[in-house]
């Protein structure tokens, strides 16, 4: 069977097309792992904060992402599966693989569209930043300090046990 | 000629795919269009957990604009241990960024729950508590306000409707780098919450609901469920001392106490482990 000459000439471009499609596919990235950055986190039975806690997940633990639903991630950790909010993870952990960067170098310019997405959500870090500029008398530095008050999981367990309380 | 056209189409498709993935400007424009349409569809959505968090942070910043924080690490750690113990047993054990407990350096007894989970208790109220179970009762009551979203619910419905109406057009304004009406609506929301939690106090029904949540939480955590009514009785005896602070924001009325006693009477003889807890409460320097 004779191969058409146009196929020979254009197959390089077709290969490039297929390669680009594969690299853009999330499936290529495989199972994504994410590191928990917030204290006192748990796997929850449902994708909302009212869900029943299934198992605790300590700071620094690496979980495997099964699927996502909006800001919620269904993850596996030590044989348990449950939901965790995106806020439990460090922001920088999200993009693990940048196939376009690998192909063409440089970062993908998404910052502006991310800002637009945040603005569309309502009260966001950008809204807080503008509010802070307008109200320098508000003490956000102390709020940041208060948010740094965290209880170590192991110490809390000891505290509960010593006080005869329910874990 | 036809083959060259086909090659051209494939090349254009490949470039479109790559540029599409790279998030070029026209993709952003499409995103805005989709989001604007979505905004119209979600015109009646409630305040999200992350929005609640940013409102709570601003309310806390306003409280801390006129109040100092107690910086004693032992007291901070202890209050957070008690608070986290009760928060875990509350109807809302997790929030967007978790619960954080802090002590305000004032002798006026009071406690505030900012939306999202920052909870303040004053040094004056910690001193009024005679033991760990009473401190746990105060914190469980405030966690109850967070769980019931009482702070967020004090934002006027008209203001939130205006926020949602504004968002569709605001997206485009933000993209153009301009500020917007959303900032003043955020400001108004902070005012609504601040006036409720710090100045006027919650409604009687919200107070009684938070009391009931606190009793259930104390019971689940293993604390004395009667500790809240014991503290309230103490507060009623001191009510003549003033009408500000907690006496204004959380008025200890006889009706409130009667309801509390019906679900959890005050304990007269503390258990052995309650005595252990009281000992560690007294060992913390306040």
Image (cartoon, coloured by chain):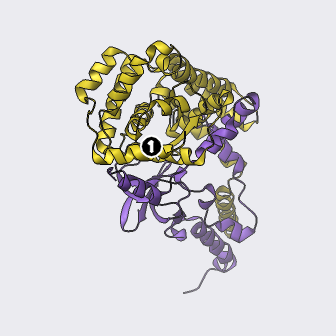
Percent from the top left, x then y, of residue A35? 54, 63
Which residue is painted at 64% across and 60% down in the image? B17
Q: Nearer the viewer, residue B278 or B1?
A: B278
Q: Nearer the viewer, residue B261 or B21?
A: B261
Q: Chain of mark 1?
A: B
Q: Secondary structure at mark 1?
A: helix
Which residue is painted at 51% across and 25% down in the image? B109
Which residue is painted at 36% across and 68% down in the image? A79
Instruction: Please determine whether, in this image, residue B105 is positioned above or below residue B248.
Output: below
Percent from the top left, x then y, of residue A24? 59, 64
Looking at the colours in the rendered structure, which chain would you say is drawn in yellow?
Answer: B
- Evaluate whether residue A83 shows in this view: no
Percent from the top left, x then y, of residue A94? 59, 59
**Residue linked to disc 1:** B281
Looking at the colours in the rendered structure, which chain would you say is drawn in purple?
Answer: A
- Evaluate whether residue A42 shows in this view: yes
Name the quadrant of the N terminus of chain A: bottom right
Callout 1: few (<14), some (14-19), or many (20+) C-alpha neighbours within 10 Å?
many
Q: Nearer the viewer, residue B279 or B82?
A: B279
Task: Residue B29: name its quadrant.
Answer: top right
Q: Is residue B30 left or right of residue B269?
A: right
Task: Residue A120: name its quadrant.
Answer: top right
Q: Nearer the viewer, residue B71 or B166?
A: B71
């Amino acid at each position: 069977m004779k191969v058409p000459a146009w196929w020979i000439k254009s197959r390089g471009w077709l290969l490039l097309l297929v390669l680009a499609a594969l690299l853009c596919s999330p499936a290529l990235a495989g199972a994504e792992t994410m590191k928990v950055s917030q204290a006192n986190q748990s796997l929850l039975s449902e994708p909302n904060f009212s869900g029943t806690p299934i198992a605790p997940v300590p700071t620094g633990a690496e979980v495997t992402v099964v699927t996502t639903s909006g800001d919620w991630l269904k993850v596996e950790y030590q044989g348990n599966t449950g939901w965790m909010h995106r806020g439990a993870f460090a922001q920088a952990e999200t993009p693990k693989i940048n196939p376009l960067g690998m192909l063409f170098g440089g970062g993908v310019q998404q910052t502006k569209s991310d800002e637009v997405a945040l603005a569309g959500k309502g009260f966001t870090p950008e809204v807080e930043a503008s509010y802070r500029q307008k109200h320098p008398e508000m003490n956000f530095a102390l709020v940041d300090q208060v948010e740094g008050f965290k209880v170590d999981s192991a110490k809390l367990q000891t505290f509960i046990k010593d006080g005869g309380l329910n874990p | 000629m036809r083959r060259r056209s086909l090659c051209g189409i494939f090349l254009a498709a490949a470039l479109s795919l790559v540029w599409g993935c790279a998030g070029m400007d026209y993709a952003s424009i499409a995103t805005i269009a989709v989001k604007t349409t979505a905004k119209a569809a979600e015109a009646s959505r409630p305040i999200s957990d992350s929005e609640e968090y940013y409102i709570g942070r601003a309310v806390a910043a306003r409280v801390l604009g006129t109040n100092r924080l107690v910086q004693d690490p032992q007291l901070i750690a202890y209050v957070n241990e008690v608070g986290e113990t009760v928060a875990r047993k509350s109807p809302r054990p997790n929030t967007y960024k978790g619960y954080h407990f802090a002590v305000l350096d004032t002798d006026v007894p009071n406690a505030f729950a900012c939306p999202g989970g920052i909870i303040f208790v004053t040094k004056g109220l910690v001193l009024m508590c005679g033991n760990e179970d009473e401190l746990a009762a105060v914190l469980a009551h405030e966690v109850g306000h967070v769980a019931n979203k009482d702070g967020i619910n004090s934002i006027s419905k008209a203001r939130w409707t205006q926020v949602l109406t504004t968002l569709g057009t605001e997206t485009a304004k933000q993209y153009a780098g301009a500020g917007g009406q959303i900032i003043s609506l955020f400001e108004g929301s902070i005012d609504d919450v601040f006036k409720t939690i710090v100045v006027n106090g919650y409604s009687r029904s919200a107070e009684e609901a938070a009391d009931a949540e606190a009793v259930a939480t104390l019971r689940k955590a293993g604390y004395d469920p009667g500790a809240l009514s014991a503290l309230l009785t103490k507060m009623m005896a001191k009510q003549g001392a003033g009408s500000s602070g907690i006496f204004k924001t959380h008025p200890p009325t006889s009706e409130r106490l009667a309801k509390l006693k019906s679900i959890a009477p005050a304990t007269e003889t503390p258990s052995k482990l309650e005595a252990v807890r009281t000992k560690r409460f007294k060992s913390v320097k306040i």
